[in-house]
Amino acid sequence: MTTTPQTCRGAAASLKGRAHAENQDAWAMVRSSSRGAIYAIADGVSTSRRGRWAARHACTRVGGLLRERRELEVEDLLQVVSEVDWELREEGRGSAACTLSVAWLRDGRACVLHVGDSAVYRLRGGEVARLSQDMGRGARLVSYLGMGAAVSDRLQVLCEPLQEGDGLLLVTDGVNKVIRPGELAAWWRRIDGDPAPCVKGVVAEVWRRQGQDDATVIAVKVG
């Protein structure tokens, strides 16, 4: 059974990595009565001097899409992301870059846009499925915003139908490095898919396992 995005609820939490002087992750949750809900996470590339600004700028621009007073399609989201890539290169003067994962929930679907090594998971019936591609090669990130025009060919875009009871988890690589997808699914089942305790538990577990990278998670429950 499909459901409308107005019945979704979400929560977010973020933790500064032990090895970092500042948290370079960012997130956004924006809802509209007529345009659905956008959930986004971004991770500033640590080798870029303005990674923190890049992540925050990307989330602000993507979340602002739902505030526009016009009909919107997935192509509009792609256009915003293309503009962000240019803005990071122009305003950041080559020192700003970030990953980005977005889930736009509307009309009974989750439209996912992704670039980088963060992850978007769907939880359904006790099973977990990764919807996003891993665009990293070991410790090397090969696709990210701020890399230039080539990013348009590397963006992953897909739309998946939603069902009542589905869950979505958006996590930065600071979570992926220390918690396996199956563990996330088990935790989701234990707390009965409640987003708030889910995100608090995930970042607490990252800290307990002495995660070195910034860790951010958004949890969304459908229905």
Image: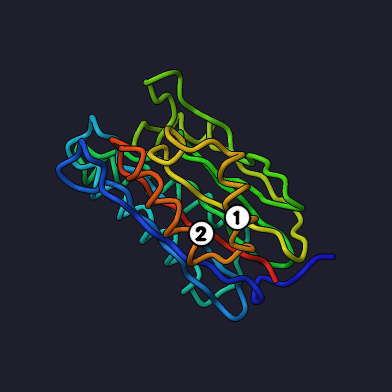
Picture coordinates of residue 152, whole percent (x, y): 51, 36
**Amino acid marked by disc 1:** Trp
Find the distance from the CA under tag 2 to the CA under tag 1: 6 Å
Dot 1 corresponds to which residue?
Answer: 188
> Measuring 30% from the left and 55% from the top, which residue is drawn there?
56
* Colour style of the rendered protein structure: rainbow
**Amino acid marked by disc 2:** Cys
Q: Is residue 148 left or right of residue 115?
A: left
> Measuring 76% from the left and 66% from the top, which residue is drawn there?
164
Quarter placement of the C terminus: bottom right
> Measuring 61% from the left and 39% from the top, which residue is drawn there?
182
Q: Is residue 49 left or right of residue 149?
A: left
> Measuring 59% from the left and 81% from the top, which residue is drawn there?
33
Q: Is residue 198 left or right of residue 53?
A: right
The crowd level at tag 1 (other Cα within 10 Å; few <14, some 14-19, many 20+) is: many
Picture coordinates of residue 153, whole percent (x, y): 54, 31
Residue 198 tag number? 2
- Asked if disc 2 and disc 1 are in contact, CB closer than 8 Å, the reply is yes
